[in-house]
Image (cartoon, rainbow, N blue to C red):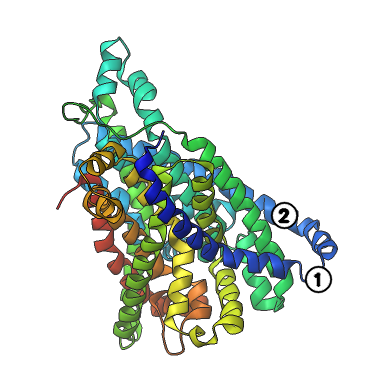
Amino acid sequence: MPASSDHAPARVLGPLATLVAALTLLPVVVVVVRGGADGWSAAVDYLVRPRIGELLAHTGWLLLLTVPAAMVLGIVAAWLVERTDLPLAGLWRTLMLAPLAVPAFVSSYAWISWQPQLVGLGGAVLVTTLAYFPFVFLPVASLLRALDGGEEEAARSLGLGPLRAALRTVLPRLRPAISGGALLVALHLLAEYGVLEMMRYQTFTTAILQQYAVGFSDTPGSLLATVLVGLCLVVLALEVAARGRRRVARVGSGAGRRADPVPLRGWRAPALVFLGAVAALAVAVPVVMVLRWLLVGQSQRGVDLSDLGPVTLSTLALALAGGVLAVALALPGALLLARRHGPLAILLERSTFLASALPGVVIALALIGVAVDVAPAIYQTALLLVLAYAILFIPRAMVSLRAGLAAAPPELSEAARALGARGVSVLTRVVLPLAAPSVLGGFVLVALAITTELTATLLLAPTGVETLALAFWGAADELDYTAAAPYAAMMIALSVPLTVVLRRQITKEG
């Protein structure tokens, strides 16, 4: 039961979290209103067509195959790296995070240019699984490293074997990390466009983009987006049920310590082969193919790098601004959820996830409509683009902040209040320092996403501003792989240091 001293922070955090939820729900409201512009009977007639069922089946199969595959890859890899005597664990930890440095549509571009027949559901599942499993690996590995091994040792002292002890004591405490990672994978799949367009696999997202780009029709596109919002609601409800409410934070006498590594013995070689295969497919294939096209372009006509510098700088500036804004907007909801895990806090937190399931182009069109009608001064400015980034990527910051705040013992905040600290002082002197790695992790996750965001940028980028993703897509869309290669290489290069920061979040280095 929350202490009475939590009432004051809740009075401040509640309105702030409500404002953020209202902001993120604004595009959803616009989409629903536009979807019903021709009348709800016409909307129902449109939505019961066989085509909608086909799109629903395609999207459902993608979710049903990719999310479990990403969970298995992420959990097994995290357990091997953090809980066994695997050789070179630091190297494997870096390699398992390295796919985050390769944008998913760049991986798709590499696979398609190498294996053109790899299209359809199989190719889409392969590429998205390899691109998104680090979203599960990162929180699971981080939590495995932070968990006190005392419970596991106690279970083994009572006669349980290593595997049964881990399943009984460790796995239940991993539920928030696993469910949070799976949620990110599912939301990315619902909103994914670049990979699926290259793989020629139709889902609601690609259909919405085609509706807007080819059909020039707002209402059907909004109706398709409304269905996507419904799918997002289902995913969010499932994640709430899967997360559970088991306590992760530890407080008490003595210091926690890591569990002893499990000896792999005869399983060491298969484990190394498994992790090596994952790293080769997820990282080596796209990097080698990008380098190959760079070399081909250099030998054929020389690589034109004149635009690379300005495009890179504009991408970095947008990533920095969007990352800071997303973390700042996610903080009130994450704090409220950590201190008051009630229905209202869950509802406000869940609300921020809805818009992220929509394709960026839908968010962009909704914001354009609102800006033109309400605030024309911000139309075609960087402010509107950064706001779209924040709305799209708040869940990344929210999941990271939520995990960090969950591991911060609330008793320490109570102790600070007992010593006379109040409100902002408790937040800045106790809570945020404890959650600092998660705050940084959330910023990095958002910045990584912004450097590769495509569809919202396409519509909202101010005149004369181009990003790496726009430049890459413009060339790749014309099948000019050699012209696209420098921008793909730069996106990978920019993501590498950010991935190193994420690795340090696991190990708490430096």
| Residue 42 occupies quadrant | bottom right
Tell me the tag on residue 38.
1
| Label 2 Cα neighbours within 10 Å, binned few <14 / some 14-19 / many ≥20 | some
Tell me the tag on residue 54.
2
Left or right relative to 85: residue 63: right
Establish if 215 lies above or below 143. Answer: below
Identity, as a three-letter code, of the amino acid under mark 1: Asp
Residue visible at 58% across and 66% down?
26
Residue visible at 29% across and 10% down?
158
User: Mark 1 falls on what kind of element?
Assistant: loop
Q: Position of residue 74 (x, y in %)?
A: 38, 42
| Label 1 Cα neighbours within 10 Å, binned few <14 / some 14-19 / many ≥20 | few
Quote the CA–CA distance across marks 2 and 1.
23 Å
Number of the front mark, 2 or 1: 1
Q: Position of residue 299 (x, y in %)?
A: 31, 81
Identity, as a three-letter code, of the amino acid under mark 2: Glu
Q: Nearer the viewer, residue 392 or 59?
A: 392
User: Mark 2 falls on what kind of element?
Assistant: helix
**Lower position in the chain sequence, tag 2 or tag 1:** 1
